[in-house]
């Protein structure tokens, strides 16, 4: 097997990973369980598992790196499965969201501040969006 | 601007999205807030927001597609930010996890069953893994 | 030991459970870890563990009742620990929230509908709250 | 209305709160939506909303106390609704879990340590529980 078949963030489009996952699920006849609702539940469960290794940790504590990587992978698998099920292009959605965030968090207002967009605009604009 | 600059699952490697996010965060001086722990919290919060549009929904109910796409994008943004912060290659981690799942869920055992790997193996093997 | 010492929803005020938990934590010198932020993380992690036994389950599937009870207990323990840490009276907060929900979801509008309050009011009121 | 009707952690048993919630739900004909699975989803969504006010916060940052109280109340409401739906006595489950934690985290081992029980026992016992 050549290295090109290996997945990396540098080279592999998500579509190739989605293909691999679709074959994996089909072989096991798992599409029947993969309703959008259950895939969203699965993603939320995995997000909780990803959060667990950080619980009670202080800034200088060592992190359980391997566990974190594995849970991060699980989150991504759920996100890809859900996007496939709904026919959503994940990275196109990410691009739209970055554009929206650029509007909500203009550099002039957001620089060095961790506040949400509605708080950022308090005192700046009369109304503000929801 | 040519179409090549647009993100799609078919063509864009995650590394290109990560570059865009890194520039976005740097312009706003947000790296100071992006500890691994807070990024994992952010991902979990977004996973909850992604789950909300499915709450109380029955199989035939219409889904709030636009909201779901936006929350899915937020989850992915958090996952990419966290992977960058930790130096994890997301898709390499996904490939390793798929390989692990292939071992845990062999087709012969898992076909048509939604049980977890430890339940699947009950009665098949004396011990079983954790 | 007499039965009065046992906790039940019918008889035990949360304050008595909080006392027991405070002693438990103090004996182990765990208050140092119990920042409000980490207790909120803990509660979220436990909520994910509570959700997991429902994943992929269809309406008629059997539920892992014992696991669910244990995770529900964990959620409550986190909620009580967090309320103690912040000096919040949980049930007073619940009463306030029920009153708020009664305003947001008047019987005349909400009866038989699972919509959120802002959706419920669409077409009923010109503005609507956030 | 006399003060006795108000809920407090010092005096009110959870059963009284459960009665109030049952009446609230019945008036709105909401029991039809309250499957155990959807109540567990609701609790998880609320746990995410409770976590959000802590996101990006450093130890000395001010907390959005009112929002936190309200989300904590929502978590408790979901927990009570779910316990009622499943016929679980919440505080009895909490008592059992405290007893289990006392075994898993004996003072001699757990004092001043935030490690999970399986990590605590490493090097202490040959096997260890799951």
Image (cartoon, coloured by chain):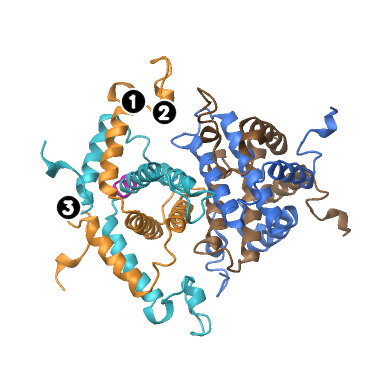
Chain colours: A brown, B blue, C orange, D cyan
**For numbered disc 3, what is the local secondary structure?**
loop
Chain name for mark 2: C
In the rendered image, residues at marks 3 and 2 fall on the same chain: no
Is C43 included in the stretch rendered in magenta?
Answer: no
The one of C26 and B2 positioned closer to us in this rendering: C26
Chain name for mark 1: C
Q: Is any atom of residue D124 visible in this view?
A: yes
Mark number displayed over residue C115:
2
Estimate the x, y position of residue A50 in percent, counting from the top left.
Answer: 57, 57
Cα distance between the residues tagged 3 and 2: 34 Å
Q: Which residues are magenta?
A: D81-85
Q: Label 2: few (<14), some or many (≥20) within 10 Å?
A: some
Q: Is any atom of residue B105 visible in this view?
A: no
Position above or below: C129 against D39: above
Q: Outermost residue, left direction?
A: D2
Residue at (46%, 43%) from the top-left corner? D49
Q: Image check: B127 left or right of B101?
A: left
Badge 3 is on which residue? D11
Cα distance between the residues tagged 2 and 1: 8 Å
């Amino acid at each position: 097997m050549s290295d090109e078949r290996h997945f990396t963030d540098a080279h592999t489009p998500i579509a190739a990973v989605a293909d691999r996952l679709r074959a994996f699920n089909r072989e096991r006849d798992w599409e029947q369980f993969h309703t959008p609702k259950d895939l969203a539940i699965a993603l939320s469960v995995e997000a909780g598992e990803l959060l667990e290794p950080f619980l009670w940790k202080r800034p200088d504590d060592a992190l359980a790196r391997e566990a974190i990587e594995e849970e991060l992978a699980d989150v991504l698998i759920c996100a890809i499965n859900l996007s496939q099920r709904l026919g959503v292009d994940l990275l196109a959605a990410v691009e739209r969201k970055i554009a929206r965030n650029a509007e909500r968090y203009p550099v002039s207002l957001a620089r060095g501040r961790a506040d949400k967009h509605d708080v950022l605009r308090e005192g700046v604009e009369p109304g503000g969006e929801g």
